[in-house]
Image (cartoon, rainbow, N blue to C red):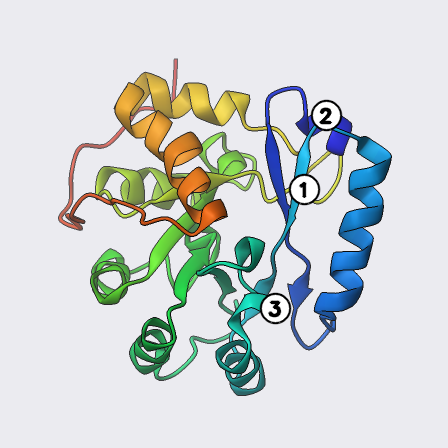
Amino acid sequence: MCRAAAAGTTDLVVTPHNNDRFSFDPDAVEQARQELQTAVGESIHLHRGCDLHLSMQNIEAALSEPSRFTINGHSYLLVEFSDELLFQGTAEVVERFRKAGIVPVITHPERNRHLRRNLRRLARWVHRGCLLQITGQSLLGEFGEAARDPAVRMLDARLVHFVASDAHNLKRRPPELAQAYEFVLDRWGDPDADRLFIDHPWAALWGDTVEAPTPDPRPQRSWSFFG
């Protein structure tokens, strides 16, 4: 996967899940990251992160030691919502994160059946300090229309701050973003493509400020995916 990603990517954040199924040991993850970095050499640079599932235990752990969970030990934290139900008190959690210097990045909201239904709710969270990350393959229809159409609407509404590979393997979930980049470039232009794939990820990697446009969740133009 690292060799495949290196064909078009300079830096890769490894983000194991932290949920009821997978326990997260930051020290073990860092050791594994170092071993993998040694194996791949300078072809690509690897950084540690975590895909934190919202639960009271995980929230308290992240608040107590943010750098053990955030991207590259800085301020941005990937946060994943359950597909089964929406975490209650999200606005309060966001406020606690922001006061602790953590910027929550909600991962693949277009693939969550609760989150993708209400762009205004996502816009409120963005206004409170959240950022949104969609999956590149969602734009290409790899997760079906149910994910593709909301992803496009989120981009139209200027709610998206990052497009990521969310890679899991070399076949169905490869670490490849070239086609998604071309998709965004074709429909939204150079500034947005560079912002979503280069500028914002680089800022998050090093703890710099992400300068995001003001969201506009009102219905906008629709795209035809035929022909």
Of marks 2 and 3, which one's residue comes earlier in the chain? Answer: 2
Q: Residue 90 appears at what percent x and percent y? A: 35, 77
Classify 163 as above or below 75: above
Q: Quadrant of residue 227?
A: top left
Residue bearing the label numbered 1: 46
Relative placement, left or right, of 91 versus 46 is left
Kind of residue sitting beneath label 3: Arg
Q: Residue at x 72, y 25 (%)?
A: 43
Relative placement, left or right, of 123 versus 181 is left
Neighbor class of circle 3 (other Cα within 10 Å; few <14, some 14-19, many 20+) is: many
Relative placement, left or right, of 58 versus 154 is right
Residue 130 in sight: yes
Viewport quadrant of the N terminus: top right
Q: Are marks 1 and 2 in contact (CB under 8 Å)?
A: no
Residue bearing the label numbered 2: 43
Q: Residue 117 appears at what percent x and percent y? A: 32, 59
Relative placement, left or right, of 41 versus 89 is right
Give the total number of marks visible in the rendering.
3
Q: Nearer the viewer, residue 189 or 220?
A: 189
Kind of residue sitting beneath label 1: Leu
Q: Residue at x 51, y 64 (%)?
A: 80
Kind of residue sitting beneath label 2: Ser
Identify the element where label 2 is drawn.
Answer: loop
Residues under labels 2 and 3: Cα distance?
Answer: 25 Å
Classify 85 as above or below 127: below
